[in-house]
């Protein structure tokens, strides 16, 4: 038997060198076998105080493997509920009311100042890729600047022309403001007969400027809006009246969240 184990040990060493991981596993088995052969298995049976227990092991070290009856699990101590006095209950109720009032106030302020909308279309790609969730600051028609990305409520006639649910906000970029003249030549935008077209770094990298529109004279209180995805955006260029009422702007977008993360505009 010892000769057999010696031969197997040599084989294990060879496998350890050749097969690495497999050899290590086999060597471990061989070492365990040698230990059991030279350090025989030992067991111990005990009966004390009505408890029957069996221990087993090797190398003179034993571990419990069976016990009857099984040891009882220690009972968890139940936390004693503190009995509050009338005064303590009153103070606790006041704290809860104050916390609720503060929470409602914060929510009310957020609802009044922040708008969150889902943009399902790709007319603002690559700035806003569908589907995206945009967050904007409510403006109530004020503080609108050129290049702002705005959410705006369409009129019924505009909704019919765009085939978009009028309950959903339209998201476009402000190109021209009230009192301005806007003209598009070969896809480039000129404001108030300026010889230099608008610089638009937000447009798709592969966009090739094309198309001629206008000139349009934007009435006071109105906006000329376009999508960044110029070849796939139904906007002021194509609408019958061409303009959006500034009072219908619900918010100016400053955050966009999509599957790639959250970005500022």
Image: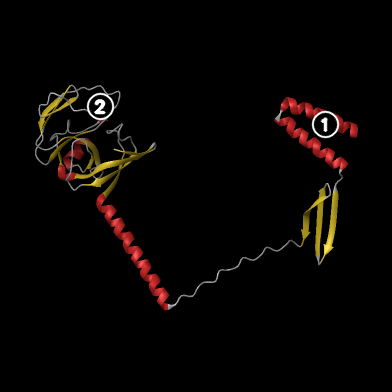
Q: How many marks?
A: 2
Residue 77 at least partly seen: yes
Q: Quadrant of the C terminus?
A: top left
Q: How would you rate the neighbour count of disc 1 (Cα within 10 Å): few for under 14, some for 14-19, many for 20 or more?
A: many
Instruction: Kindly identify which residue carries mark 2.
Output: 231
Relative to 126, say whether 35 is above or below: below
Query: Residue drawn 86% across and 31% down?
Result: 6
Choose the circle earlier in sequence order: 1 or 2: 1
Residue 163 at least partly seen: no
Q: How would you rate the neighbour count of disc 2 (Cα within 10 Å): few for under 14, some for 14-19, many for 20 or more?
A: few
| Position in image of residue 23 (x %, y %) | 74, 30
Q: Quadrant of residue 25?
A: top right
| Position in image of residue 261 (x %, y %) | 38, 38
Instruction: Kindly identify which residue carries mark 1.
Output: 9
- Report how far apart the C-alphas of labels 1 and 2 lie in the structure: 76 Å
Query: Residue drawn 17% across and 27% down?
Result: 189
Relative to 83, say whether 98 is above or below: above
């Amino acid at each position: 038997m010892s000769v057999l184990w010696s031969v197997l040990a040599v084989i294990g060493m060879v496998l350890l060198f050749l097969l690495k991981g497999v050899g290590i596993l086999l060597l471990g088995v061989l070492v365990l076998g040698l230990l059991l052969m030279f350090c025989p298995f030992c067991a111990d049976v005990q009966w004390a105080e009505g408890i029957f227990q069996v221990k087993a092991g090797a190398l003179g070290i034993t571990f419990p493997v069976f016990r009857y009856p099984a040891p009882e699990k220690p009972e968890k101590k139940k936390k004693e509920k503190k009995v509050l006095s009338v005064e303590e209950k009153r103070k606790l109720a006041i704290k809860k009311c104050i916390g609720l009032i503060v929470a409602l106030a914060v929510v009310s302020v957020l609802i009044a100042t922040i708008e969150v909308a889902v943009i399902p279309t790709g007319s603002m790609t690559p700035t806003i890729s569908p589907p995206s969730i945009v967050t904007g600051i409510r403006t109530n028609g004020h503080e609108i600047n050129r290049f702002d990305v705005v959410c705006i409520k369409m009129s019924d006639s505009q909704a019919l022309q765009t085939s978009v649910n009028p309950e959903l906000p339209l998201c476009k970029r402000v190109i021209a403001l009230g009192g301005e003249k806007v003209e598009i030549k070969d896809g480039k935008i000129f404001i108030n007969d300026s010889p230099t077209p608008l610089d638009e770094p937000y447009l798709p990298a592969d966009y090739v400027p094309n198309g001629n529109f206008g000139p349009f004279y934007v009435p006071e209180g109105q906006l000329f809006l376009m999508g960044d995805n110029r070849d796939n955006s139904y906007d002021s260029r194509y609408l019958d009246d061409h303009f959006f009422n500034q009072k219908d702007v619900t918010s100016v977008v400053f955050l966009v969240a999509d599957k790639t993360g959250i970005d500022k505009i």
